[in-house]
Image (cartoon, helix red, strand yellow):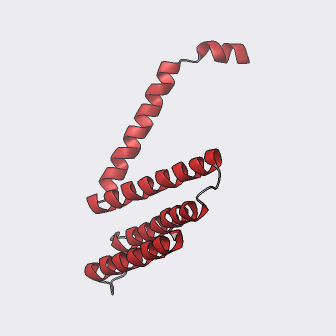
Amino acid sequence: MSLVDKIKDFSLKEEIEKLKELFQSFYQNYKDANSEKIRLIDIFIVFSGIILVLQLIYMLTNGLDPMNSLIAGLISCIGSITLLVCLRLHVNPKTKLPENSTEQIYIEFFVASLILFFVCINFVG
């Protein structure tokens, strides 16, 4: 089969339907395998990642004019993502350590987040 024949047989609608089925099955498996708490943590991780990318785009397009603010924002996003991934690992029943209580996990996350944001605020100026 030549390349021209493959191009003639290509149907964009079929490929879009295959992708749609793939994403629907992925989402259904993800939804069945994870609790609502973990899904909320994942949404916040994605949100922090989007904010990080937006800050990087701003930095590339406009330069490093308020440098301390940009660096503090990047550190805040990266630190938040790191803390959220750790929280997700500790909250997930599959990877949770038995000696840690749920309250202790959330208090540690809260205190670490406060420290992170105080550091970022002090770095701004």
Query: Which of the image's four quarters has the N terminus?
Result: top right
Q: Nearer the viewer, residue 106 or 95?
A: 106
Q: Quadrant of residue 35?
A: bottom left
Residue 72 lies, with reference to residue 29, above or below; the image says: below
- State the image coordinates of residue 104 (x, y, percent, origin top left): 30, 83
Q: Residue at x 44, y 26 (%)?
A: 17
- State the image coordinates of residue 55 (x, y, percent, origin top left): 54, 52
Q: Nearer the viewer, residue 9 or 88?
A: 88
Q: Residue furthest right?
A: 2
Q: Residue at x 62, y 55 (%)?
A: 65
> Total marks drawn?
0
Q: Residue at x 57, y 64 (%)?
A: 71
Residue 87 lies, with reference to residue 33, above or below; the image says: below
- Asked if one can make out residue 95 in the rendered structure from this viewpoint, the answer is no
**Left or right of 66 on screen, residue 51:** left
- Asked if one can make out residue 28 in the rendered structure from this viewpoint, the answer is yes
**Left or right of 39 on screen, residue 77:** right
- State the image coordinates of residue 20 (x, y, percent, origin top left): 42, 32
Q: Residue furthest bottom?
A: 99
Q: Quadrant of residue 25?
A: top left
Q: Quadrant of residue 95?
A: bottom left
Q: Residue at x 65, y 16 (%)?
A: 7
- State the image coordinates of residue 83 (x, y, percent, origin top left): 44, 71
Q: Nearer the viewer, residue 79 or 20?
A: 79
Q: Nearer the viewer, residue 86 or 116?
A: 116
Residue 72 lies, with reference to residue 3, above or below; the image says: below
